[in-house]
Image: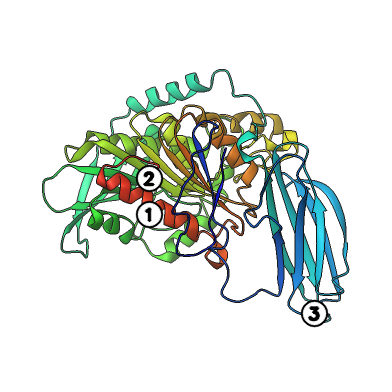
Amino acid sequence: MRLAYFRGRSLLCLAWIIGSVFGTRWTNCHGADAAATKPVLVVATDHTNGIYAVGEPIVWRVETGNIGAFSEARYNLKQGGQTVLREGKLALNNSIEEVAAKLSEPGTLLLEVKATDSQGKTTRALGGAIVAPGQIPVSAPRPEDFDAFWQSKLEELGKAPANPSLTPGESGKDNVDYWQLSMDNIRGAHIRGQLARPKGGEKRPAMLIVQWAGVYGLAKAWVTDPAAAGWLALNINAHDLPIDQTAEFYKDQFEGPLKEYWKAGNDDRDKSYFLRMYLSAYRAAQYLTERPDWDGKTLLVTGASQGGLQTLMLAGLHPKITAAIACVPAGCDETGPKVGRSPGWPGWYWNTQGKDAAKVIEAGRYYDVVNFAQNVKCPVLVGVGLIDETCPAAGILAAVNQMKGPKEVVFLPKGDHQGTDNSHAAFNARARAWKEALLSGASVPPK
């Protein structure tokens, strides 16, 4: 495959090169996310995009602001974010040191440097590298009854009438209508969200927005802004909670009944907390397809982190999804530790305290995004942070490599999970380009 590298903010990955493997476009956006001021400790690879071939030497340059800034500096080098390959001490005699390595197989490397100053304060910095991204394999085979399991869950959902209820509200925008939406889910649970669309009777392309991890309300602008641009937009809460309560309400929920919700029922595929969440996303998408104001052509699902998890899951589960946009998606490679790779949040493999570990790991296979990915046939845009320790790059790419439709991957060499120092800017720019193309009826990936 060919790789395109762009060095200026003005381009922000404007050009995209089609890869020869499964039609994937690998986009490398180094330079666009540079911090305005130089950090005290900088770790960077000699390939500014962080991408290498199998067996190719990888060199990290570790640099401090000035000679003698630190009294000690140590590093560790991990493969797949988990397996420690090497540890050592850095001299930093000239404020610069190098660490070299290479991989004989597709995968990722993460260099962690901790430097201590004369006052005992420790500064930590990371540098990521990825080797043959289009060839990273899954860590475990797909369960043979995976599709049958989810078909049975969709049948269970179908037996619970949706009973959608819309409550109109003020959009705050002259040209936008707004409603709060509630629907019924399985086993007495509910779906809570908000819907907005441009005023008028025209049919519109639809966008479903799903949420990152945590317990919080929904900002009205999350749907009214897309609606003002022309979308029929639906945004749902990941939890069975009202969407417009006080911050204290959500704090109490997070510290009380929803504390560590991601662990709830994780030793039983029929009782996992994520079952209700996944089916909420499915029903929300289905609701949009049944509205008379949907244009019947475009149904985009988008989200980041836990929202990215739901996005890619839904792209593989709902047949009418026509495009998916996911930044640093969670839930990938939950069996990664079997091959020495760190799993993506919520880390089913590790969350086994007080439970039968084998049952937790087995249940997690039915919620692993990797196992939905081979059913994804629509165009997909994915953002991957090379220093993301919450949702590591290797697992995300293992999922992407299973997808059968057109794909674009935006590599974020300085991207952690939170997008610190605007490190997700290149992905955000490309996501805007995708949305503009979809809204206008153009094909994606857009050129």
Count residues near mark 2 (Cα–Cα under 10 Å), then give few for <14, some for 14-19, many for 20+. some
Count residues near mark 1 (Cα–Cα under 10 Å), then give few for <14, some for 14-19, many for 20+. few
Mark seen at residue 69:
3
Which image quadrant for residue 290?
top left
Q: Is residue 230 visible?
A: yes
Count residues near mark 3 (Cα–Cα under 10 Å), then give few for <14, some for 14-19, many for 20+. some
Q: Is residue 128 left or right of residue 227?
A: right
Which image quadrant for residue 420?
bottom right
Q: Amino acid at mark 1?
A: Arg
Residue 314 lies, with reference to residue 447, above or below; the image says above
Residue at x-position 43% and y-position 65%: 247
Percent coordinates x, y for residue 332 in the rendering? 58, 39
**Which residue lies under the disc numbered 1?**
432
Pointer 2 with pointer 3, Cβ within 8 A: no
Residue at x-position 56% and y-position 75%: 36
Extreme residue in the left direction: 201
**Which residue lies under the disc numbered 2?**
446
Closer to us: mark 2 or mark 3?
A: 2
How many labels sit on residues?
Answer: 3
Q: Amino acid at mark 2?
A: Pro
Q: CA distance from mark 1 to mark 2?
A: 11 Å
Percent coordinates x, y for residue 242 in the rendering? 35, 53
Residue at x-position 25% and y-position 56%: 229
Split into 4 quadrants, where in the image is the N terminus?
top right
Closer to us: mark 1 or mark 2?
A: 2
Q: Is residue 74 left or right of residue 130?
A: right
| Depth order, front residue of 438/72 | 438
Helix, strand or loop at mark 3: loop
Helix, strand or loop at mark 2: loop
Percent coordinates x, y for residue 178 in the rendering? 21, 55
| Depth order, front residue of 284/269 | 284
Q: Earlier in the sequence, mark 1 or mark 3?
A: 3
